[in-house]
Amino acid sequence: MNVQLVGRHDVVSAAPAARPAILEVEDLHIAFPSRLGPREVVRGISFTIGAGEILAIVGESGSGKSVTARALVGLAGSGAELRARSLRLSGHDGEARSLTELSERQWSKIRGREIGFVLQDALVSLDPLRRIGREVGEPLLTHGLVPRAEIGKEVETLLARVGIPDPVVRAAQYPHELSGGLRQRALIASALAARPRLLIADEPTTALDVTVQQQILSVFQALAKAGHGILLITHDLAVAAQLADRIAVMQNGELVETGPAREVLRKPRHAYTQRLLSAVPSAATRGRWLSTSGARPVKAEPERSQPILALRDIAVRFTRPDRSVTHAANGVSLHVYPGETLGIVGESGSGKTTIGKVALALRPPDAGEVLFRGQAWSQLSERQRRPLRRHVQTIVQDPLNSFDPRYAVERIIEQPLLLHTDLGKAARSARVRELIQLVNLPSDVLDRRPTALSGGQRQRVSIAQALASEPDLLICDEPVSALDVTTQAQVLDLLIALQNRLGLAMLFISHDLGVIRHMSDRIAVMKDGVIVETGAAEEVFDAPKHDYTRRLLEAVPRL
Amino acid sequence: MPGWLASVLPAGLRRLGVIVAVLWGAATITFVAVKAIPGDPVAVLTGGENIVDAAEREALVRQFGLDQPLPVQYLRYIGQALLGDFGDSYQYRQPVIEVIGEAAGPTLQLAGTAMALALGFAFVNALATAGRRKGLRTVLAGLELAVLSTPVYWVGLLLLTVFSFYLGWFPIIGGEGLPALVLPATALSLPLAALLGQVLRDGLEEALLQPFALTVRTRGVSETQLRLRHALRHAALAVSTLTGTLFAGVLAGSILTETVFGRAGIGQITLQAIKTRDMPLLLGLVMLSALVSVSINLLVDALYLLIDPRLRRAPR
C-alpha cells in the first residue's frame, strides 16, 4: 500500500499545475461577533483544490479548520462574517461561481449538489431515526435529480460504490444497526449522491478503529482517482500523510505552511509544523521527550521479581439485552511489575477497558482472580479493600465527567487527602500546592472550576488527584485520547517524568499504537477479550508473532 | 411463531400483568376509601334519612348486598368489576356502565377536540419559531406564559363574554353539535397548546443542534424541510409522553370546563356522584380513569417504539 502511495505523490509533484482547479480560495477571513467586537477566527487563508486532488488542512482544535470547511458551504454558524478576495467554485457545467454573497436559496443549490460534506462519527451524523436508504437518497430528492421511484435503485448503486456489501439489506436498516465502518461509508455515499465534484471531509475517520480507518481512507483514495477534489480536515498528521497530495498546516486561523505532503512532513519549514511533527509519539520517539527537544534520562530497568499487580485467568461475561453472551475478557493473565509500564492495546470492543475496571476492582471478574502485591485483591470485600485503594489510582479519558462540576480544583485534589490521610487543614492545603506544582500547573488554577480549564489542564488536575494518595500503581485508560497532539505530548512527558521520579507502575490502556509504543516497557495486544500477543515493546512492534498484531500495525498510517 | 412475535410476546404479557395489577389496586383503594367514609348508603339511596320504614330499608340493603360481611362484599365487587359490572347507580337507578357510557360521549368529544386543537397550535408555533424568528418567538413565548398562568374557567368566561354575549356567534350554555363545542374546546386547548408548544420547541431546538442536522443542511435541504423531515420526529418523543399525560388530565379535569359552559359529561356526573355519595358510580368512575391512564401509557409506549427504531429490541 505504501509503495502505491509513493507513486501517487511522485505524479503530483511532477505536474502540479496540470489540474484544473475546482475550488479557489483567496484571502479568506471569517469573524464572529463578540462582546469585544468582531473576533477573527480565520485570518486571510488561501488555497486551491484541483480535480482528483486531496488537500489536507491539518491543525489542532480551535485552529479554525472546521469553521473554514463549514464556511465553504455557507454554514459557518450564525453571525459569521465572511470576507474573501475570491471564493470560486467550478461547477458541474464547468462554469465558475462565486461563493460570496449567496442567498440561502442559492446556497441550497450548492450544498450537496456542488459540494458534498462528510462529517465525523456517522452514528450521530446520520439521522438515527431514519433508514440508511432514505438518508443516502435525500440529496437526490432535494435536488430533484432522479424520479422518486428510481431513488431506491440509485441508492443501491451508491452504497455499492463505497464498498457496502448487500446494499439492499443495508438500505433498509437504521444507522445503529450498522458497524462504524459501514456507517461512515453510508455517510460518504450520501455526500456523493448528488454527484458533487468537490468533497469536504471533516475528521472522517476520527471515531474509527485503525483497521476500519484504513478502509475508509482507501474509499477516499478511490474517489480522488475518479476525479473528485477532496478537502480533508484532520487533526491527525498520519492520516493526512497517507491520504493527501498537499498539506496545509493551520494555526490560530492562519495557514503557516502549505506544500506537497511529502515535503511538509519530511522538511517542515515552519516552527509550528516542526513542533507538531516531533510531538507525535512513535517508534522513533521512545527514550526522548515529546514536548521539548533533548533525550530523557534512561529509566532504570524495572525489578521483575514480584509483580505489583497480577491478573490470573480473568473472565468477564456480559449478557446483552437479546440474551446473547459477550466475553469481554476470557482467560486474561497479566503481570505489572513495580516501576514499569504495561501497555494494553486493542480496538474498541476488545475488552481493554473491562480489564482496567477489573484491575481497579470496580468490577468483579466472573472467573479468575486479581492479586495486588501478591495478596488477595479482587476477592476482598469492599470494606476490606477500602484502606488499600489509595495504592491503586486511575486516570480516565475525560476527567470532566468524574469531577464534581461545583468543586474548585483545590477541593477536587483535596478529596483523596481527606479520605486517605489524617492531615490537618493547613497541611492538606500545602500538600495540594505541592501536587499542583508536581504536574506543572500554576497555583492560580486552584480557585477555578473544572469547566474553566482546558483539556490538558484538566488531565493534569486528574493526575494530581491520582497522585495525592501516593499510589504505587496508576491505571490509565485512554488518558490522552481527547487531547490535541501538542497537549498529548506534554501529558505523556509528565507521566513519564513522574514515573521516573516516584517509581510508579502503570497499566496504560490505549487504542493508539504510537502512544502505546512510546510509553510502554511491555505490551499486551487484546482482541475480542483475549490477549493474542504479549512481550517487550520492541519485540511486539518489530517482530509481531500474531496475525492480528501484524494487521493492526499495517493499518496504522505512517508519517 | 414468527420472530417479531417471540420478542414482543413476553413484553406484551408483562405489560398486561401490570395493567391488571394497576386496575386491581385502584379498585381496592376505592373500595376501602368508600367504606371508610362515614354515612348511611341507604339514606343516599332513598334521598334522605328516615323517609323509608324498616321493611323497605331491609329490602334495599339486601338488594344492594350491604348486609353481607365486608370481605364478601369486596370479593363480589372485584369479581363483578372485572366483568365490567359495577352495579346500579344509587342516584340514577340504572347500571353504572350505562350512566358512564352516556356521559363519556360529550366528554371525549370535548377532550379530543381540545387536544387536537392544542397539538395543531403547538406544531405551527414550534415549527415557525424553533431556532429562528427571534421577535415572533419572544411574543409567542410571552403569550404561552400568560395562557399557562391563567385558570381555564377564567379563559372560558372571557371567551363566553366576547363571542357569545357580545358577538353572539356561539351558544351561551349547553347546546348541541359543533357550534357548542368551539368555545369550550378552545378554552381547554389554550394552556395545553402553550405547554406542548414549549416542549416541542425545546425538542426541535435540541434536534437542530445535533450533528445530523448539519449533515442534512449540507445536502441542500431547506430549513423547513429539515424540521419536517428530521427534527420533528426527534421532538415527537417528548411530546408524545406529554400529550398522553395531558390527555388523561383533560379527561379527569373536565369538571371545570363542563361547569362553566354548562355541558353534560363525565365531569358533571362525577360532581353529582361525589355530592350524593353515589358509591357504585364513584367506583366505576375511578376504574374508568385508571383504565384510561393505563391505556394511554400503553399507547405512548407503543408510539415510542414506532418513532424510535433504537428502542426496538433486535429480534433474533
Image: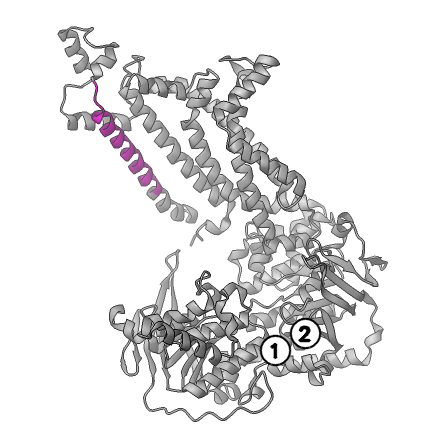
For residue B271: magenta? no
Kind of residue sitting beneath label 2: Leu
* SS assignment for the magenta stretch, majority: helix
Instruction: Check the residue under mark 2 and report the chain it is in.
Output: A
Rendering coords of residue B128 (x, y %): 64, 39
Q: Nearer the viewer, residue B263 or A445?
A: A445
Kindly state the secondary structure of the residue where label 1 is placed.
loop
Pointer 2 local density, CA inside 10 Å: few below 14, some 14–19, many at least 20:
many
Instruction: Check the residue under mark 1 and report the chain it is in.
Output: A
Kind of residue sitting beneath label 1: Pro
The residue indicated by pointer 1 is: A557
The residue indicated by pointer 2 is: A243
Q: State yes or no: discs 2 and 1 in contact (Cβ < 8 Å).
A: yes
Q: Nearer the viewer, residue B266 or A80?
A: A80
Residue B297's place in the image compared with A320, above or below, is above
Which stretch appears magenta?
B15-39
| First reached walking from the N terminus: tag 2 or tag 1 | 2
Residue B31's place in the image compared with A105, above or below, is above
Rendering coords of residue B108 (x, y %): 46, 24
Looking at the figure, which quarter contains the C terminus of chain B? bottom left
Rendering coords of residue A356 (x, y %): 40, 73
Looking at this view, name the residue that lies furthest to the front. A426
Residue under the point 27% across and 34% down: B24
